[in-house]
Structures are given as structure tokens and as C-alpha cells.
Amino acid sequence: MDISNETLMLMLRRMWTIRHFEEKVMEVHSAGEFAGAAHPYIGEEAVAVGACAALKPTDYIAGNHRSHGHPLAKGGSMKGAMAELYGRVDGYCKGKGGSMHLADFSIGILGESGIVASSVPVATGAALAAHLKGEDFVSLVFFGDGASNQGACHESMNLAALWKLPVIFLCENNQFAVTTSYKDSVAVEHISDRAPAYNMPGVLVDGQDAIAMYEATSEAVARARAGEGPTLIEGLTFRYEEHSLGLGRVRRGEYRTEGEIDEWRKRDPIVIHTDRLVAQGIATAEECEAISAEIKQEVEEAVEFARNSAFPEAPDLFDDMWADPIPAP
């Protein structure tokens, strides 16, 4: 599959955006600059970036945990995301949503949720809306291996296949649901093996390879746009950090070893993509390093933007919570 050099370079830029954003989030969270949960996407960047590169700006995405990576992969604003983490009015949801509720309808980001698998029916509903209204957009939902066992996930896949809805189910299999290995909770070898039960294609993809993710998603998008229904994609990946900031790295040895983490780091998604760009003469190592440095500076600017943004005012607490005025029955 032909991919333009511009798209390949954009993938690198967005992977570095996620990596440096998350590294900074870990730093400021540890310093106590904002409260609440945060789930680092470090190590999984190729999954979201490769998938989102295959979508149009008008296509929809939704997600669950590790929810900073998804909107940033779709082209979301670092400043808006960081301000939301800080609970400030310039955040995506005016400081009311926090880390796990980043939404920007203008570029198709429906938002994320802390309720496991709850975004799967949301994305399926968006696909149903497209189907009923005859609109040309697809919906893609990111969910983890733990969410794949939830009833909401299975119900959504069954409905989408039955009605041939333009939705892509993308399971980010990072091996563990918090501290439980997917091998201890999934009866089949791969989560994508479940797809035939719903009469849809199931595709197992190397989630460390952004191009592989792009190609698999592109095929699923083409299928969805042609009215052929959904696809289940499983991106096999690995999170380097704990499930959530604050759980403590000491717990790492309870369910996985440093050696296991080190082995996955040898296939870092950013290194894989950079090496390919350099080997193919698309960019030099120096140009790739310059992109990383540029993104680092943009992350620092996003943090300062968040710090300088105001907190929401008490009278505005219930704004945007429901339709205003509430429609008459």
C-alpha cells in the first residue's frame, strides 16, 4: 500500500507528540500539579497514530483508558488536552472532564470514558447515525483487552455486524487489564479470533508498527465505506508504564518483570518508524531528532498554557451538562 512521505512524517510527528506529552504528564502529576487518574500511552503510540492516519478529519473516534493518545493521534490540541488535565477553562471540556474525557467534535473526537468498554456502544451509535442519515463517515473505537470481555463490547459488535454499520473495533491489546494478563481472561488465542462469531473480519496486527496499523485500518475503512460492515482489529502492543499513575512502579514485579518490559522496548514504535524513514531516505536522523526537539518545546508551551489558564467559576458548574433550554416533551 502506497503511503505518501507527508503522511509518514506526520505519523512520526504525532508519535513524538504523544510520547513527549505523556512524559510531561507523568512529571507534573508526580509533582502534584494536577489531581486525578492519568493513564500513560507510552509504548503504544503506533496503534492510535497508524489508525488515525487512515481516517478522514470528519471520521469519528472514541476511546477508553490511555485516553490522551487517541485525540492527539487524531490531530487534537496539546494545549487543550493539557489544560483539561489541569482542570482549567481552556481545556477541551472547560476543565470539567479531566484526563479521561477529552472531546473535540470539530475533528471527530467523540471523547473517552473511564467506564470500561462504555465507548464501544457510543462509537457504534455514531456509525448507526451515519448509516441512517446516509452520511459518508466511519466510526472507530479504541478499547483494551480487558474491555473486550465486557458485554457492551459484544453487544455492539453483534449489532454492528447485523446491520452492517460503518464502525471499526480496534482492540489495543497491551497484554494486561490493569494487572491481569489477557491470557488468563480470554478463552481464544487472540482477541481478533472472536470476529468470525460476529461474521466480520478479524485482523491481528503488529501494534508496534505504525505502517502495519495504517494498512489494516485503511482496509477496514474501505470496507466500512463500501457498506460491508465492521472489522475487528487487534493491535498487539505493550504499555511501558503502570496502568495508571499513582499505582506505583513497585507493583510491576507482581505481574510482569523488568526483563519483559525491556524486551518490548527493543521494538519501540518510534524507533521502528524512525529507522524505516531513514533507511528509505525519506528523512535524515537529524531531521527526525529535530522533530522530537520541536515537539518537546511545544509540550512545555502547553504546560505553561495550562498553568496560566483560569479555573472554572462556580456559577458555570452546570453549564453544558444538559440542553439549554431543556426541550419540552
Image: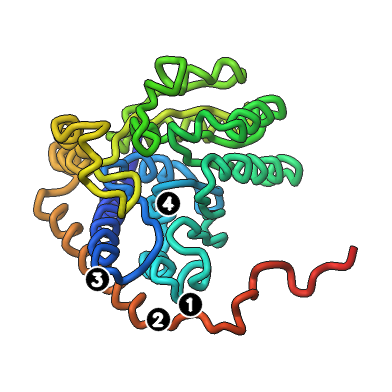
| Occupied quadrant, residue 166 | top right
Q: Going by the image, does 169 lie left or right of 40?
A: right
- Mark 3–mark 1 Cα distance, whole angstroms, equals 19 Å
Residue 48: x and y, percent? Answer: 39, 44
- The residue at 54%/20% (across/down) is 195
The earlier-in-sequence mark between 3 and 1 is 1
Q: Amino acid at mark 2?
A: Ser
Q: Secondary structure at mark 1?
A: loop
Say which residue label 2 marks.
309
Residue 116 lies, in percent from the top left, at: 52, 42
CA gap between label 1 and label 4 equals 19 Å
Using the numbered discs, state the Cα–Cα distance from disc 2 to disc 4 in whole angstroms: 22 Å
Q: Which three-letter amino acid code belongs to the residue tagged 4?
A: Ser
Decide if residue 36 is on the left or right side of residue 268.
right
Q: CA distance from mark 2 to mark 1?
A: 7 Å
In the displayed structure, 197 sits above or below 34; it is above
The disc at residue 99 is none
Q: Secondary structure at mark 4?
A: loop
Query: Is residue 6 at least partly visible in the picture?
Result: no
Q: Which mark is residue 300?
A: 3
Image x and y of residue 237, in percent: 31, 33
Q: Amino acid at mark 3?
A: Glu
Alpha-carbon neighbours of circle 4 within 10 Å: few (<14), some, or many (≥20)? many
- What residue did someone put label 1 on? 89
- Check the image and report above or below for 267 versus 315: above
